Amino acid sequence: MKKRKSAVNYNPEVELAKGAKLEAAAYDKTQKAAVIAGKVTVGGKPGIAEITGIATGHVPQAGIEGTVDLWLSIFRYMRPDGTIDHVSGWNIPLLLKAGQTPIETARAFAAYINGGTRPYRAKAAGNKTKATVTITFSGE
């Protein structure tokens, strides 16, 4: 939802520094996730999550065990024309398969994020032992 405010109050340094807080959690015995850069800003600063270890995998009756989750918080920012944009939060859980490598997990997160309608884009990089998911705000 967009609201109109006075463009006189627009401060580009403040508004471009606003963004979503990135959090990660791993509920797998052997694959772990950590946040390297914890904020995805309107101004283009990416959030980065690192994934390590080979996955034990999801057990169907075990609930969240065998998953890795990323969360992007809600936030608001003002555009130069005075319009205020509200960006919804996003919880992204991913079920792991036994033997899944970090790069496979990172690619799965990137594909899910890029296939969604939220204003984020992601890239995966790494190898079979350590990988990263880099998330940027696209504003679209």
Image: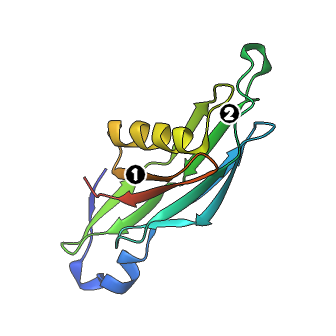
User: How crowded is the residue under tag 1: few (<14 C-alpha within 10 Å), some, or many (20+)?
Assistant: many
N-term mark: 2 or 1: 2
Looking at the image, residue 17 lies above or below residue 124: below
Q: Secondary structure at mark 1?
A: strand
The residue tagged 1 is: 122
What is the x, y in percent for residue 76? Answer: 41, 63
Q: Quadrant of residue 67?
A: top right
Looking at the image, the residue that sits furthest to the front is 128
Tell me what residue is drawn at x 50 percent, y 63 percent: 47
In front of the other: 117 or 9: 117
Tell me what residue is drawn at x 24 percent, y 76 percent: 6
Q: Amino acid at mark 1?
A: Ala
Looking at the image, residue 99 lies above or below residue 5: above
Q: Is residue 21 visible?
A: no
- Left or right position of 120 against 4: right
Tell me what residue is drawn at x 67 percent, y 30 percent: 99
What is the x, y in percent for residue 5? Answer: 27, 70
Looking at the image, the residue that sits furthest to the left is 81
Q: Quadrant of residue 41?
A: bottom left
- As drawn, the label of residue 67 is 2
The residues bearing labels 2 and 1 have C-alpha atoms spaced at a distance of 19 Å
Q: Is residue 95 visible?
A: yes
Looking at the image, residue 70 lies above or below residue 35: above
Looking at the image, residue 58 lies above or below residue 90: above
